[in-house]
Amino acid sequence: MISKVSIENFIIIDHIDIEFKKEFSSITGETGTGKSIILDAINFCFGKFSSKTIRKDESKDCAVEILFDNLKIKKVLDKSGKTSCYLNGEKVQAKDIKEMMPGLVDITAQSDSILSKTSQREIVDNFMIAADKNAGENLADIAQLFSDLNSVDSEISKLEEDARIAKRDKAYYSQVAFELANIDIKKNEETELLERRAKLAKLCSNDNLIKAAADSLQSSALSSSLTQSIKNLERVNSDITDSLKNRLEAISIEFSDVTAELTDTANDTESREVELNEIDERLSLIRTTARKFNTSASTLFEFLEEAVSKLKLSDDFDSKLQKLMEKRNQILSNYDSVADHLHDMRLKAANELSEAVCDQLSELLMPNAIFKIDIQKSDFVRTQYGKDEIEFLANFNKDSLLLSFSQIASGGEAARLNFALKTVLGVNSSFDSIIFDEVDVGIGGAAAFAIGNAMKKLAKNVQVISITHSPQVAARADSHILIQKQISNGDVRVIAKILDHNERIQEIARMISGNTVNPDAIQAAQQLLI
């Protein structure tokens, strides 16, 4: 439950602290004093209201802090326009705070519409979840299955399109596969051939130097000198000369190997030229083939793989489609099973909600009103919420037909039905606080008094905060908060004050008679507060 709201530098508010009681609090004040701005501030804190121009003084930070029984939420919009969120003093992400709102507070405004099918479904589902926590899991399951169904349908569509193209181009890809397989194209072949050609070309351009180096080694007396030195050291037979002899033997062997290899390299001039010609011919074939199929030589192997894949797709289409259809049918079966169960749960919840709302409407001085939630299941409609079409039906006059609520509700009737629904939901909901923002607009007299009584009754289950212009509603509150706007030297200051009994009489009298409070209004206010 909300125990305190602190607002700093927000729209027309410099600083204000508002403390709330645990039961029923009413907030009143003249039009334009800033009552609804308090709701804007609460919504801002939860991420439901956003603006970069909400700072009254652009040179200062804007901050809203809400203190609940066991936690503190704060949001700051600093001078640079950056927002920061805090939970019990620790910085958190804005989405973390936003996700907490449904479990903490519900805000109902007079402008809230219950005429749309979406709003009506949400109302039924919220009541259903409050009555049975498993319903929330079913809603999550149906949403996931709907997503899975869309995914597999997308896979099927893509497979069918790919297969259509593959079948259309089968002759072309068959020719590609045949010709590229015929020339035995290899992966990265062009790159490897170019690298090999560069090495061979460099050798060929330096053949004279290589031959001269080979001839020089062959004509050298170094080999004979090494051999003679080794023989001489063998005769010495000494530990000191043995290691030197071994090293000379190694040098002699290496010298002989280098000489032989260099000689072979010098003698391979003709074979290198032959290989160069073969490489050039291969490169020419690869490039000619690539041009024929309007691709690059460097990606010719990948082009072959693509052609083979297209042909395989065409050949394997039926089996792949069958697997996807089996997957789709399984998802569809699961979806229908969950949707049918969800339908039954909604029917049960709708009957209970309809009955409770009718009882509440009777307490709101609409004894002849009948409210019914019609739920029709369609096997031809599947959405992320199931297969149900939900519509609110009502009549507000005795013996009249049930019609769609959107067709027959006047402003006052819509307001009372909306309030009745929220009252029933409030009793069964998971949130701790409910805030009504001028839901009694257009309602007066005994009906307004009935709404005040309903709020007081609801406050036994949840904390109720009502922003109201109705004296009958304000009089039923356990705590009365007055919002006033003071103007001094052109500066606007908003203040909040918890009224004592005598101050409540004066404020309710003002609400009855206007700015001029007369004795009759005072007496009427006293009667309302009894």
Image (tube, rainbow, N blue to C red):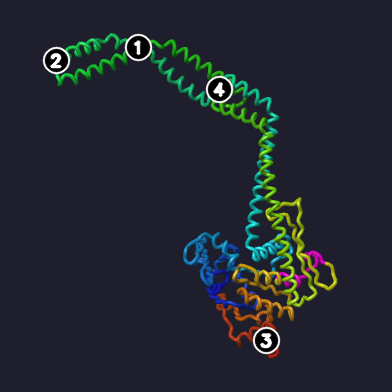
Q: Quadrant of residue 402?
A: bottom right
In three-dimensional space, the C-alpha distance between marks 4 and 1, rounded to whole angstroms, equals 35 Å
Q: Earlier in the sequence, mark 3 or mark 2?
A: 2
Q: Which mark is residue 475?
A: none
Q: Position of residue 188 (x, y in %)?
A: 51, 26
Q: Earlier in the sequence, mark 2 or mark 1?
A: 2
In three-dimensional space, the C-alpha distance between marks 2 and 1, rounded to whole angstroms, equals 35 Å
Q: Quadrant of residue 131?
A: bottom right
User: Do the residues bearing badges 1 and 3 touch, measured as CB atoms within 8 Å?
Assistant: no
Q: Earlier in the sequence, mark 4 or mark 1?
A: 4
Question: Judging from the image, what secondary structure is the residue with disc 3 in?
Answer: helix
Q: Residue at x 65, y 49 (%)?
A: 147
Q: Earlier in the sequence, mark 3 or mark 4?
A: 4
Q: Looking at the image, is mark 3 or mark 2 nearer the viewer?
A: 2
Q: Which mark is residue 263?
A: 1
Q: Looking at the image, is mark 4 or mark 1 nearer the viewer?
A: 4
In three-dimensional space, the C-alpha distance between marks 3 and 4, rounded to whole angstroms, equals 98 Å
Q: Position of residue 497 (x, y in %)?
A: 57, 80
Q: Residue at x 50, y 17 (%)?
A: 279
Q: Position of residue 63 (x, y in %)?
A: 52, 68
Q: Quadrant of residue 117?
A: bottom right
Using residue 255 as the reference point, say whether residue 390 is left or right of it: right
Q: Earlier in the sequence, mark 2 or mark 4?
A: 4
Looking at the image, can residue 490 be seen? no
Quick one: 198 or 221, which is closer to the camera?
221
Q: Residue at x 63, y 60 (%)?
A: 134
Q: Specify the segment rendered in magenta.
A: 402-418
User: Do the residues bearing badges 4 and 1 touch, measured as CB atoms within 8 Å?
Assistant: no
Q: Which residue is mark 2?
A: 236
Q: Looking at the image, is mark 2 or mark 4 nearer the viewer?
A: 2
Q: Which residue is mark 4?
A: 185
